[in-house]
Amino acid sequence: MLAWFLLALVTGSLVYCVLTIIAAIRYRAVRVPELHTPMAISILKPLAGVDDGLEENLRSFFEQDYQEFEILFAVRKQDDPAIAVAERLRNRYPRIPSRLIVTGEPPYANAKVYSLDLMLEAARHDLLVMADSDIRVTRDMLATIAAEFQDPRLGLATCPYRAVPGRSFWNILEAIGLNTEFIGGVLVARMLDGMKFALGPTIAARRATLAGIGGFDAVKEFLAEDFVMGKLAAERGDGVILSSYVIEHRIGAQSLAANLKHRLRWNRSTRRSRPAGYVGQLFTNPLPLALMLWIARPAWWPVAAVTLLLRAAAGWATARHVLEDSLTGRLFFLVPVQDLLSFAMWVGGFFGNTILWRGRKYYLRADGRFEPVA
């Protein structure tokens, strides 16, 4: 009975691999319209400390080939070392309107949302691009976003991302997982149910859309505020898309312990944000399921072989065809290792309701809200 149950799970995973390949092809088939009516854009950048490559990341936004945009930065404390980096770039690019805001301590748990809220009040334009500090882009990023927002029905766009790790084996594994597994789930969800969520690293939205969902007050208590923001916009009836522009997400370098804590926080947050979807992630890890089936029934090894081939095809479709990721191409042999680690962390995500984030401990409620633990 166990072998047949595992076979059913593996079969579901194989179907998911095929769906991933189809979803990747359909995503790449979308063509960005030509930009006819550029609109002014406000870029909102929450900062907290100096990440690896921070100056290069921020510089990529100053160097946009776009007619009219401004950049707003927000830090929590006056002594944040990120201020020096931001000021250096502001002086280097004086023709780009920019502003730095010191927010003080946030009145609620999600400091990022508090920073975004204050920057929104100071922003001059109605099209807003909210991008994390670890994001790097090419010069045509704003032009692509503006071209997509020529559609008056569009209220919010979220950018897929190509993970770029630092010099850490564990972050290399994480990047391979993000580029072959995580993005696959995003693409399949987009194909089957439409975009009813957003991805945190970079979100573009109209001011009217944010106001319509209740502003940042509506998402300030959630850990996965990005997911909720896209969900509320879709429920309101505003168009939500997965942008055709792929950003670079610089995930840095971590020790094994730090990386495992990061992964566990992500899994627990996902479990609280979308419980049913989290259970369904079982099918996004076909190799561990096929390995268990092979152990249970060695004679069924051809199933494991087919699984390996389809997992490779699905990973290649997302990492190379969609994200144009060279890292995964060079280190594709690490995909099974990453899949086993990802499966273990997925199981671990079912246990515990607390997370560690920026050195503080938080309690996750059943509805996805979170609060600091005294």
Image: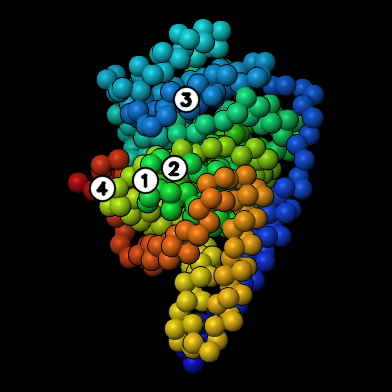
Residue placed most toward the observer, 148 or 249:
249
Give the quarter of the image for residue 342. Answer: bottom left
Q: For the residue labelled by badge 1, is the local secondary structure a helix, a strand or a loop?
A: loop
Q: For the residue labelled by badge 3, is the local secondary structure a helix, a strand or a loop?
A: helix
Give the quarter of the image for residue 79. Answer: top left
For mark 2, what is the residue? 165
Give the CA distance from mark 2 to mark 4: 25 Å
Is there CB contact under 8 Å for labels 2 and 1? yes
Above or below for 305 versus 26: below
Comes first in the chain, label 3 or label 2: 3
Count residues near mark 4 (Cα–Cα under 10 Å), then give few for <14, some for 14-19, many for 20+: some
Residue placed most toward the observer, 73 or 364:
73
For mark 3, what is the residue? 56
Count residues near mark 2 (Cα–Cα under 10 Å), then give few for <14, some for 14-19, many for 20+: many
Left or right: residue 25 versus residue 269 is right
For mark 1, what is the residue? 168
Q: Nearer the viewer, mark 2 or mark 4?
A: 2
Is there CB contact under 8 Å for labels 2 and 4? no
Above or below for 103 versus 178: above
Residue placed most toward the observer, 305 or 74:
305
Comes first in the chain, label 4 or label 1: 1
User: Tag 2: residue type?
Assistant: Pro
Count residues near mark 1 (Cα–Cα under 10 Å), then give few for <14, some for 14-19, many for 20+: some
Left or right: residue 183 versus residue 82 is right
Comes first in the chain, label 2 or label 4: 2
At a point 64% along the width and 71% down the height, the residue shown is 15
User: Tag 4: residue type?
Assistant: Lys
User: Tag 1: residue type?
Assistant: Ser
At a point 43% along the width and 49% down the height, the residue shown is 172
Q: For the residue labelled by badge 2, is the local secondary structure a helix, a strand or a loop?
A: strand
